[in-house]
Amino acid sequence: MEIVAAADSDERGLTLLRVVSQLQRVIVYLHSFACDRGHLWSTQSADARRTPIMSDEQICKKVKEICEELILSQENLKEVCDVLHEELNKGLGKDTNPEAPIKCFPTYVRELPNGKEKGRFLALDLGGTNFRVLLIQLGEECSMDSRIYAVPQPIMVGSGDGLFDHIADCLASFIKERDLGEELLPLGFTFSFPCKQEGLTKARLARWTKGFKCAGVEGRDVVELLKAAIARRGDVKIKICAVLNDTTGTLMSCAWKNHNCRIGLIVGTGTNACYMEKLEKVELWDGELDEPHQDDSHVEVKGVIINTEWGAFGDNGCLDFIRTEYDNNIDRESINPGRQLYEKMISGMYMGEIARQVIIRLVAEGLLFGGQSSEILEEKGSFFTKYISEIESDKDGDYNNCRVILEELGLNSATDTDCANVRHVCECVSRRAAYLAASGVAVLLNRIQEESVTVAVDGSVYRFHPHFHNLMTEQISQLIKPGMKFSLMLSEDGSGRGAALVAAVASRSSR
Ligand code: BGC
């Protein structure tokens, strides 16, 4: 009896299940009917939006379609190379330079180090969110003592005097802490913004980038402004031997031991590259034409390092054929609209925000998190660029980092499909950045036309993204002339050691 009763109740249970499942099918049918007509996400309540009616495969397919505009074809990249080559020519030409977005500033650095430089140097490094003061000992090895000082946001957008007073304060406290007051050490100033150099120790800021906007500095010589701030304090003495861009420092730092190094590249908060160009190609050059003094103590070069300032590539509209709505949004909401458009597609200051914009769109279309956003995700800047590196560091099919990050963003119930799709967005954004940077490097390699060139690279994106190096290497190989060899090499501390080396080379030349 008991067995029969149990069978009966099983039977009833099964019938009930069948009815429920039929009902579910009807509901799914009605949902997809509404969805086809585009009603679903706009008319359903937030709770109903939690139940997407598309299968995971359909969702992934749709996400891929939406992300497609971030994927650059080989033809696109070749075109980017051709246009960049032309834009660099415009920057280097005397008549075309005034209108050219890429300014190609000659740096007045004409000698590369040979590894035998010696001495103690001070360096200042301003260019990202922090400011550093360094004490560098060059010899067989290089040793360094440094301190990082924050640059508070109000100083980044305050008065020029405020910024240089802050730099002078930090320098003075460093000198006092290390008891360096008695020595007049040569100092290299790494100032990583576009500057028109008028000599090794004279650099006029052309314009601010990367979130800085201090009044009264554009058009002025930043070395003079620093000296004036130090004079206002009156308690420290310094001997500024060189002012340089971080790309130059990166090149010099790598060239110290690697004599094939001809290009310095930064992919960090901002992006930029410098390279050794032949003097005859630099119409803008107004310095000495003869070779720098040669002896066996340094490497012979027949040119000058050009700070391309390629971040401004595209500011005249020539990159519009690959820019997307996300790039437009980011530019519009930035502190410098219409400027640094190539930089805004590549560098760490913007990559996270590009990814966030895509994610927000996918949520709005009901393709992520069941259409539910979070307060944090809606905030501009909340998706940090480092998240991209962390998410892409997860092993295939594993979403540990991704989940932790989504939880930080207040998205607690992400499914595996959500994670896979967020990762896809990150990959599209970082791959595009790596390929665009690679196109730039390929153009420079093709111009230099030496058989084997080392590219010195630094910057947080290149350093910390798990695949950036490989993506770049792979793409550069596709874009350079056949038979050329190159390698991308992480350059240790360009802004510190590089600054000391420029100061060392400068003091050698002036002897
Ligand atoms: C600046 C360059 C700098 C680069 C990397 C850009 O925004 O214009 O001068 O080299 O960032 O720091």
Image (cartoon, helix red, strand yellow):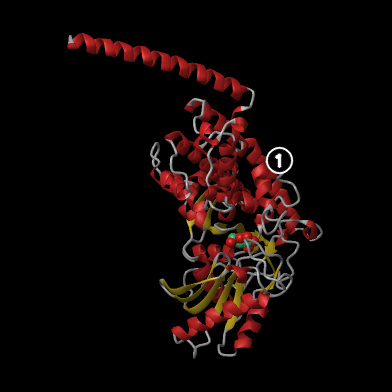
Residue sitting at 42 percent across and 44 percent down? 403
Which quadrant holds the C terminus? Answer: bottom right
Secondary structure of residue under mark 1: loop
Residue that protrudes farthest toward the right in the picture: 95
Q: In the rendering, at what x and y percent does residue 486 appear?
A: 52, 50
Which quadrant holds the N terminus? Answer: top left
Q: Check disc 1: other Cα within 10 Å, few if <14, some if 14-19, many if 20+.
A: few
Task: Please determine whether, in this image, residue 182 is positioned above or below residue 426.
Answer: below
- Amino acid type, mark 1: Phe
Location of residue 476 by image quarter: top right
Count of all numbered marks drawn on residues in the image: 1
| Residue 447 shown left or right of residue 399 in the figure | right
Task: Please determine whether, in this image, residue 236 is positioned above or below residue 157.
Answer: below
| Residue 497 shown left or right of residue 44 in the figure | left
Residue, disc 1: 321
Figure quarter occupied by ligand 1: bottom right
Q: Is residue 466 among the parts visible in the rendering?
A: no
Q: In the rendering, at what x and y percent does residue 225 appear?
A: 67, 79
Q: In the rendering, at what x and y percent does residue 368 appear?
A: 52, 36
Task: Please determine whether, in this image, residue 27 is positioned above or below residue 395.
Answer: above
Q: In the rendering, at what x and y percent does residue 482 appear?
A: 58, 41
Q: Is residue 214 among the parts visible in the rendering?
A: yes
Residue sitting at 56 percent across and 41 percent down? 359
> In front: 449, or 55?
55
| Residue 202 shown left or right of residue 48 in the figure | right
